[in-house]
Amino acid sequence: GAVVSQHPSWVICKSGTSVKIECRSLDFQATTMFWYRQFPKQSLMLMATSNEGSKATYEQGVEKDKFLINHASLTLSTLTVTSAHPEDSSFYICSARGHNEQFFGPGTRLTVL
Amino acid sequence: RKEVEQDPGPFNVPEGATVAFNCTYSNSASQSFFWYRQDCRKEPKLLMSVYSSGNEDGRFTAQLNRASQYISLLIRDSKLSDSATYLCVVNSNNDMRFGAGTRLTVKP
């Protein structure tokens, strides 16, 4: 089946640094990718919808200047957490729609010290 | 009201038990429905789609009631490997909304 990869799988950083997470669809083209965040024992929360070649659509309450999304090609979307703080520590998961199914990346666990 | 609501769980059942999960959704215009399974610290994976006519895949049966905006998942003869969190997912115009998940633990 279709595969979505994420890199890195985990990252630990100091407060105030920026972290970039890559999401790639490996065997299909995805005009739309989605970024989710999941805190421990909570559901996945949609952060934004990433559209190839245009600006991302952010959910209410998600700061677009803090969570920068770039969808430069049909197979790559990136999420940059700028000036990360401990409260940004979470599990970030991307997904892409292909073959009439939504496929998820393996997730990136971010820990901000 | 949350867009997608699920039984909070956790469900702790013995092997071989039958367990049912329920889910309700608020958007009556929702178009497609799914159950996903998420193992600890992993990404969600599609378990099965849910159709109005009901559908079955081995030990798993999913039902949809559009009038009541209700979705269910039934697991028969549960196995230890069924232990996971089950997520109810509702899709409206390619906007997928997740329930909080119901945690299932199957014990020997």
Image (cartoon, rainbow, N blue to C red):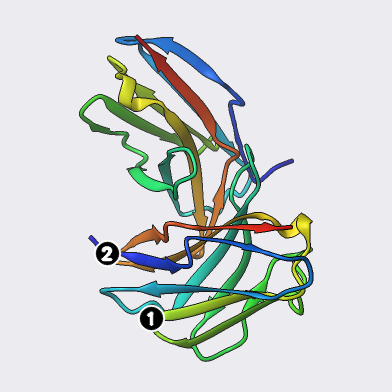
Graded by Cα atoms within 10 Å as few (under 14), some (14 to 19) or many (20 or more), the crowding at tag 2 reads: some
Side of B29 relative to A90 (left or right): left
Front position in the image: B17 or A108: A108
Q: Residue A3: percent from the left, percent from the top?
A: 30, 64
Q: Chain of mark 1?
A: A
B28 versus A3 height, above or below: above
Q: Element type at marker 2? A: loop
Residue B78 picture quarter: top left
Front position in the image: A62 or A78: A78
Looking at the rendered image, the quarter that the C terminus of chain A falls into is bottom right
Query: How far apart are labels 1 and 2 at the CA level?
Result: 12 Å
Q: Element type at marker 1? A: loop
Please, what is the three-letter code of the amino acid marked with disc 2? Ala
Looking at the rendered image, the quarter that the N terminus of chain A falls into is bottom left
Q: Chain of mark 2?
A: A
Q: Residue B42: percent from the left, percent from the top?
A: 45, 46
Please, what is the three-letter code of the amino acid marked with disc 1? Thr
Side of A31 relative to B79 (left or right): right
Side of A66 relative to B106 (left or right): right
**Residue plotted at (42% across, 36% down):** B64
B13 versus A107 height, above or below: above
The residue where tag 1 is placed is A75
The residue where tag 2 is placed is A2
**Residue plotted at (35% across, 42% down):** B51
Q: Residue A35: percent from the left, percent from the top?
A: 56, 65
Residue B68 visible (yes or no): no
CB atoms of marks 1 and 2 within 8 Å: no
**Residue plotted at (48% across, 57% down):** A107
Of pointers 1 and 2, the one earlier in the residue sequence: 2
Q: Residue B5: percent from the left, percent from the top?
A: 62, 36
B52 versus A34 height, above or below: above
Residue A73 visible (yes or no): yes
